[in-house]
Image (cartoon, rainbow, N blue to C red):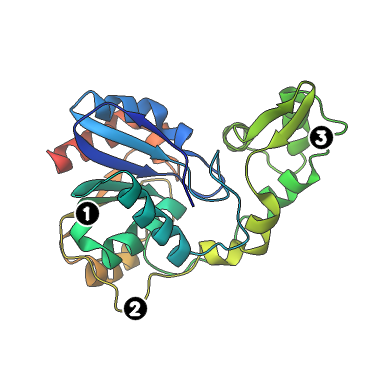
Amino acid sequence: MQLHSNIIGSGKPFLILHGFLGMGDNWKTLGKAFAEQGFQVHLIDQRNHGRSPHNDNFNYEILAEDLKNYCTEHNLEDVVLLGHSMGGKTAMLFSTLYPELVSKLIIADISPRFYPIHHNAILDGLSSLDFSVLKTRGAADKALTEYINEPGTRMFLLKNLYWVEKGQLGLRINLEVLKENVSEVGEALPMHSKFSKDTLFLRGDKSEYIAITDEKLIKSHFPKATIKTVNNAGHWLHAENPKQFYEFVMNFIQ
Protein backbone atom coordinates (compact mmCIF):
# COMPACT_ATOMS: atom_id res chain seq x y z
CA MET A 1 0.00 0.00 0.00
CA GLN A 2 1.32 3.43 -0.99
CA LEU A 3 0.32 5.87 1.72
CA HIS A 4 -0.51 9.43 0.72
CA SER A 5 1.59 12.15 2.32
CA ASN A 6 2.28 15.86 2.14
CA ILE A 7 6.04 16.46 2.31
CA ILE A 8 7.18 19.89 3.49
CA GLY A 9 10.74 21.24 3.60
CA SER A 10 14.08 19.48 3.44
CA GLY A 11 16.56 18.06 5.94
CA LYS A 12 16.30 15.33 8.57
CA PRO A 13 13.09 13.31 8.05
CA PHE A 14 10.31 14.03 10.56
CA LEU A 15 7.25 11.79 10.21
CA ILE A 16 3.88 12.71 11.74
CA LEU A 17 0.99 10.27 12.21
CA HIS A 18 -2.54 11.59 12.87
CA GLY A 19 -5.15 10.10 15.17
CA PHE A 20 -8.33 8.10 14.56
CA LEU A 21 -10.63 9.74 11.98
CA GLY A 22 -7.98 12.38 11.28
CA MET A 23 -5.51 12.99 8.46
CA GLY A 24 -2.05 14.38 7.92
CA ASP A 25 -3.58 17.72 6.93
CA ASN A 26 -4.58 18.25 10.59
CA TRP A 27 -0.87 18.85 11.26
CA LYS A 28 -0.11 21.26 8.42
CA THR A 29 0.50 24.36 10.58
CA LEU A 30 2.86 22.62 13.00
CA GLY A 31 4.42 20.71 10.10
CA LYS A 32 5.38 23.98 8.42
CA ALA A 33 6.85 25.24 11.71
CA PHE A 34 8.99 22.10 12.09
CA ALA A 35 10.09 22.34 8.44
CA GLU A 36 11.32 25.88 9.05
CA GLN A 37 13.76 24.42 11.60
CA GLY A 38 15.49 22.26 8.99
CA PHE A 39 13.33 19.14 8.86
CA GLN A 40 11.73 17.33 5.95
CA VAL A 41 8.26 16.86 7.41
CA HIS A 42 6.07 14.01 6.16
CA LEU A 43 2.37 14.47 7.01
CA ILE A 44 1.16 10.92 6.42
CA ASP A 45 -2.40 9.67 5.94
CA GLN A 46 -2.70 6.21 7.49
CA ARG A 47 -4.71 3.58 5.59
CA ASN A 48 -8.49 4.14 5.47
CA HIS A 49 -7.90 7.80 6.34
CA GLY A 50 -7.40 10.96 4.30
CA ARG A 51 -6.25 10.32 0.74
CA SER A 52 -4.57 6.99 1.46
CA PRO A 53 -6.06 3.80 -0.03
CA HIS A 54 -8.92 1.92 1.57
CA ASN A 55 -8.47 -1.69 2.66
CA ASP A 56 -10.48 -4.19 4.72
CA ASN A 57 -7.49 -5.04 6.93
CA PHE A 58 -6.88 -2.68 9.83
CA ASN A 59 -4.80 -3.19 12.98
CA TYR A 60 -1.59 -1.78 14.43
CA GLU A 61 0.64 -4.50 12.99
CA ILE A 62 -0.60 -3.59 9.51
CA LEU A 63 -0.33 0.17 10.17
CA ALA A 64 3.27 -0.30 11.34
CA GLU A 65 4.03 -2.37 8.23
CA ASP A 66 2.52 0.39 6.05
CA LEU A 67 4.91 2.86 7.68
CA LYS A 68 7.88 0.53 7.16
CA ASN A 69 6.98 0.29 3.46
CA TYR A 70 6.63 4.08 3.33
CA CYS A 71 10.15 4.51 4.75
CA THR A 72 11.51 2.02 2.21
CA GLU A 73 9.70 3.74 -0.66
CA HIS A 74 11.06 7.16 0.33
CA ASN A 75 14.49 5.87 1.38
CA LEU A 76 14.07 7.18 4.93
CA GLU A 77 16.11 6.24 7.98
CA ASP A 78 17.12 7.85 11.28
CA VAL A 79 13.71 9.55 11.42
CA VAL A 80 12.06 11.64 14.08
CA LEU A 81 8.65 10.01 14.56
CA LEU A 82 5.65 11.75 16.13
CA GLY A 83 2.25 10.11 16.57
CA HIS A 84 -0.96 11.40 18.13
CA SER A 85 -3.55 9.09 19.70
CA MET A 86 -4.05 6.19 17.24
CA GLY A 87 -1.00 7.46 15.37
CA GLY A 88 0.87 7.33 18.67
CA LYS A 89 0.00 3.65 19.03
CA THR A 90 1.26 3.03 15.48
CA ALA A 91 4.44 4.98 16.25
CA MET A 92 5.04 3.03 19.48
CA LEU A 93 4.75 -0.34 17.77
CA PHE A 94 6.78 0.77 14.75
CA SER A 95 9.63 2.01 16.94
CA THR A 96 9.78 -1.29 18.86
CA LEU A 97 9.75 -3.32 15.64
CA TYR A 98 12.18 -1.15 13.65
CA PRO A 99 14.28 0.74 16.23
CA GLU A 100 17.11 1.15 13.72
CA LEU A 101 14.89 3.49 11.67
CA VAL A 102 13.91 5.83 14.52
CA SER A 103 16.26 8.33 16.15
CA LYS A 104 13.71 9.99 18.46
CA LEU A 105 10.10 9.19 19.27
CA ILE A 106 7.34 11.59 20.33
CA ILE A 107 3.95 10.29 21.52
CA ALA A 108 1.07 12.74 21.89
CA ASP A 109 -1.62 11.99 24.49
CA ILE A 110 -1.81 8.20 24.39
CA SER A 111 -0.42 5.46 26.64
CA PRO A 112 0.70 1.92 25.70
CA ARG A 113 -2.24 0.49 27.67
CA PHE A 114 -5.55 -0.91 26.44
CA TYR A 115 -8.45 1.54 25.94
CA PRO A 116 -12.10 0.45 25.79
CA ILE A 117 -14.19 1.49 22.78
CA HIS A 118 -15.34 5.08 23.23
CA HIS A 119 -16.01 6.39 19.72
CA ASN A 120 -19.56 5.04 19.31
CA ALA A 121 -21.39 8.39 19.29
CA ILE A 122 -18.96 9.81 16.74
CA LEU A 123 -19.20 6.76 14.47
CA ASP A 124 -22.99 6.71 14.76
CA GLY A 125 -23.10 10.40 13.88
CA LEU A 126 -20.90 9.98 10.81
CA SER A 127 -22.94 6.93 9.73
CA SER A 128 -26.13 8.97 9.96
CA LEU A 129 -24.99 11.52 7.36
CA ASP A 130 -27.13 11.06 4.25
CA PHE A 131 -25.34 12.79 1.38
CA SER A 132 -28.30 12.30 -0.95
CA VAL A 133 -29.98 14.93 1.25
CA LEU A 134 -27.07 16.87 2.78
CA LYS A 135 -25.60 19.17 0.15
CA THR A 136 -23.53 21.60 2.23
CA ARG A 137 -20.98 21.40 5.03
CA GLY A 138 -23.31 23.49 7.18
CA ALA A 139 -26.10 20.96 6.74
CA ALA A 140 -23.74 18.12 7.66
CA ASP A 141 -22.60 20.01 10.74
CA LYS A 142 -26.21 20.58 11.81
CA ALA A 143 -27.00 16.88 11.36
CA LEU A 144 -24.00 15.91 13.52
CA THR A 145 -25.19 18.08 16.43
CA GLU A 146 -27.70 15.34 17.33
CA TYR A 147 -24.75 13.10 18.20
CA ILE A 148 -21.87 15.46 19.03
CA ASN A 149 -22.31 18.64 21.11
CA GLU A 150 -18.73 19.89 20.97
CA PRO A 151 -18.26 22.25 17.95
CA GLY A 152 -14.49 21.64 17.85
CA THR A 153 -15.00 17.88 17.55
CA ARG A 154 -17.53 18.36 14.74
CA MET A 155 -15.15 20.70 12.93
CA PHE A 156 -12.38 18.08 13.21
CA LEU A 157 -14.64 15.33 11.86
CA LEU A 158 -16.03 17.44 9.03
CA LYS A 159 -12.53 17.90 7.62
CA ASN A 160 -13.17 14.42 6.21
CA LEU A 161 -15.84 15.85 3.89
CA TYR A 162 -14.93 16.30 0.24
CA TRP A 163 -16.68 16.85 -3.07
CA VAL A 164 -16.97 13.48 -4.81
CA GLU A 165 -18.28 15.40 -7.79
CA LYS A 166 -20.09 18.69 -8.28
CA GLY A 167 -22.96 18.83 -5.79
CA GLN A 168 -22.13 15.49 -4.17
CA LEU A 169 -20.38 15.35 -0.80
CA GLY A 170 -18.72 12.25 0.66
CA LEU A 171 -16.34 11.15 3.42
CA ARG A 172 -12.69 10.40 2.76
CA ILE A 173 -12.45 7.88 5.60
CA ASN A 174 -13.37 4.23 5.05
CA LEU A 175 -16.16 4.46 7.60
CA GLU A 176 -17.48 0.91 7.33
CA VAL A 177 -14.09 -0.73 7.88
CA LEU A 178 -13.21 1.65 10.72
CA LYS A 179 -16.54 0.86 12.42
CA GLU A 180 -15.96 -2.88 12.04
CA ASN A 181 -12.43 -2.62 13.44
CA VAL A 182 -12.87 0.12 16.05
CA SER A 183 -11.87 -2.29 18.82
CA GLU A 184 -8.39 -2.47 17.24
CA VAL A 185 -7.84 1.24 17.97
CA GLY A 186 -7.72 0.64 21.72
CA GLU A 187 -5.37 -2.36 21.63
CA ALA A 188 -2.40 -2.30 24.00
CA LEU A 189 1.21 -2.35 22.91
CA PRO A 190 2.43 -5.99 23.11
CA MET A 191 3.74 -6.78 26.58
CA HIS A 192 7.42 -7.29 25.75
CA SER A 193 7.77 -4.50 23.18
CA LYS A 194 10.57 -2.10 24.06
CA PHE A 195 12.24 0.96 22.51
CA SER A 196 15.39 2.08 24.30
CA LYS A 197 16.09 5.42 22.59
CA ASP A 198 14.99 8.91 23.63
CA THR A 199 11.21 9.19 23.84
CA LEU A 200 8.94 12.09 24.75
CA PHE A 201 5.35 11.58 25.92
CA LEU A 202 3.17 14.70 25.86
CA ARG A 203 -0.17 14.77 27.64
CA GLY A 204 -2.86 17.44 27.90
CA ASP A 205 -3.57 18.65 31.42
CA LYS A 206 -7.32 18.36 30.73
CA SER A 207 -7.04 14.93 29.12
CA GLU A 208 -7.40 11.54 30.81
CA TYR A 209 -5.64 9.55 28.09
CA ILE A 210 -2.33 9.46 30.00
CA ALA A 211 -2.91 8.98 33.72
CA ILE A 212 -0.36 9.15 36.55
CA THR A 213 -0.81 5.39 36.88
CA ASP A 214 0.39 4.94 33.28
CA GLU A 215 3.90 6.23 34.02
CA LYS A 216 5.26 2.89 35.25
CA LEU A 217 3.91 1.12 32.14
CA ILE A 218 5.38 3.78 29.86
CA LYS A 219 8.80 3.39 31.47
CA SER A 220 8.63 -0.41 31.12
CA HIS A 221 8.27 -0.09 27.34
CA PHE A 222 10.25 3.14 26.88
CA PRO A 223 12.96 3.25 29.59
CA LYS A 224 14.33 6.59 28.33
CA ALA A 225 10.91 8.24 28.25
CA THR A 226 10.25 11.76 29.52
CA ILE A 227 6.64 12.77 30.22
CA LYS A 228 5.61 16.42 29.88
CA THR A 229 2.25 18.10 30.37
CA VAL A 230 0.86 20.64 27.90
CA ASN A 231 -1.18 23.27 29.75
CA ASN A 232 -4.74 24.31 28.94
CA ALA A 233 -5.17 21.40 26.56
CA GLY A 234 -7.23 18.25 26.22
CA HIS A 235 -6.72 15.32 23.86
CA TRP A 236 -6.13 17.61 20.84
CA LEU A 237 -3.23 19.22 22.68
CA HIS A 238 -1.33 20.12 19.50
CA ALA A 239 -4.30 22.20 18.31
CA GLU A 240 -5.33 23.60 21.70
CA ASN A 241 -1.88 24.79 22.78
CA PRO A 242 0.33 24.60 19.67
CA LYS A 243 2.91 27.04 21.06
CA GLN A 244 3.81 24.95 24.11
CA PHE A 245 3.50 21.72 22.14
CA TYR A 246 5.97 23.06 19.56
CA GLU A 247 8.38 24.23 22.26
CA PHE A 248 8.38 20.85 24.02
CA VAL A 249 8.99 19.01 20.73
CA MET A 250 11.75 21.34 19.53
CA ASN A 251 13.57 21.24 22.90
CA PHE A 252 13.44 17.46 22.77
CA ILE A 253 14.66 16.93 19.20
CA GLN A 254 17.32 19.64 19.24
Q: Residue at x 36, y 46 (%)?
A: 205
Left or right, residue 15 beside residue 86: left
Left or right, residue 98 beside residue 206: left
Query: Badge 1 local density, few (<14 within 10 Å), some, or many (20+)?
Result: many
Residue projecting furthest to the left = 254
Residue 191, which numbered label?
2
Tell me the CA gap for discs 3 and 1.
Answer: 42 Å
Q: Nearer the viewer, mark 2 or mark 1?
A: 1
Residue 109 pos. (x, y %)? 38, 51
Q: Tag 2's secondary structure?
A: loop
Query: Badge 2 local density, few (<14 within 10 Å), some, or many (20+)?
Result: few
Tell me the CA gap for discs 2 and 3.
Answer: 43 Å
Give the residue number, with chain letter if any, for mark 1. 102
Residue 224 pos. (x, y %)? 15, 61
Query: Badge 3 local density, few (<14 within 10 Å), some, or many (20+)?
Result: some
Asked whether disc 2 touches disc 3, contact meaning CB atoms under 8 Å apart, the reply is no
Q: Is residue 80 above or below residue 226?
A: above
Residue type marked 2: Met
Residue projecting furthest to the right = 133
Residue 135 pos. (x, y %)? 81, 25
Q: Nearer the viewer, mark 2 or mark 3?
A: 3
Q: Earlier in the sequence, mark 3 or mark 1?
A: 1
Q: Residue at x 48, y 69 (%)?
A: 187
- Which one is nearer the viewer's eye here, 38 or 226? 38
Residue type marked 3: Phe
Give the residue number, with chain letter if any, for mark 3. 131
Q: Residue at x 47, y 32 (%)?
A: 25
